Image: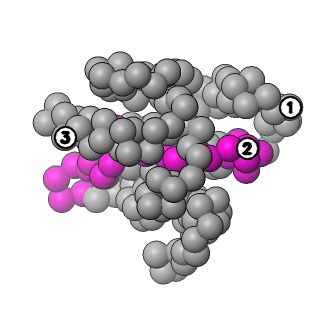
Amino acid sequence: MLSRAQSQDVDAVWIGRDLGYRGGRRTGLALTDDIHIVRHADRWGISADRPTIGSAVSERTAAVIWSMLERIEAGIFLWNVFPLHPHDMGSPFTNRQHNVRERRAGEEVLGRLIQLLKPRRIVAIGNDAAMAVARLESLVPIVSVRHPSYGGQRQFMDQISEMYSIIPTQQVGLF
């Protein structure tokens, strides 16, 4: 995906906080769960099979993110401040916020990713992502949007709809 994105026009890098146990821990991809992994690969013209066995697991944030991405044709690369799944010791089915050391390592990788992809803008999804990208020395404009979890779904969808000039759809039925 990275090499494909590097050779294409990248409108934005959408940045979340870190991989969750129901989404990115299973797929290895930011803001992407089992349900959306094939669509994610298709956006970059590559093929991918779901890397997990059993029933596909959906993740709330990924569902909202992808409900918008499916309506946007622009090149959008998905990433996280910390690109791995931080969890409680011995409990991989938990989520915890990354620590300072992990954040610093993630920010270093993020800075290099932005240099490599040269996006026109960065979309920081949520306060944690916004604080991290604000620390980067980047000449790329940063747009902060509400994280879609914990009551932020409607505001996130409205902000993305406005940013990409898409007509908002009825938001009932996602959750």
Mark before the other along the chain sequence, 1 or 2? 2
Q: Is residue 157 above or below residue 102?
A: above
Question: Which of the two discs, 1 and 2, sits closer to the camera?
Answer: 2
Q: Write the start and end of the magenta stretch as one range.
A: 67-91
Q: Is residue 112 visible?
A: yes
Mark 2–mark 3 Cα distance, whole angstroms, equals 31 Å
Instruction: Give the residue number, with chain letter if any, for mark 2.
Output: 72
Q: Amino acid at mark 2?
A: Ile
Q: Which mark is residue 105?
A: 3
Q: Tell me which residue sits at (46%, 38%) in the image.
A: 118
Q: Tell me which residue sits at (23%, 38%) in the image.
A: 108
Q: Amino acid at mark 3?
A: Ala
Instruction: Give the residue number, with chain letter if any, for mark 1.
Output: 167
Circles 2 and 3: CB distance less than 8 Å? no
SS state under label 2: loop
For the view shown, which residue lies furthest in the left direction?
101
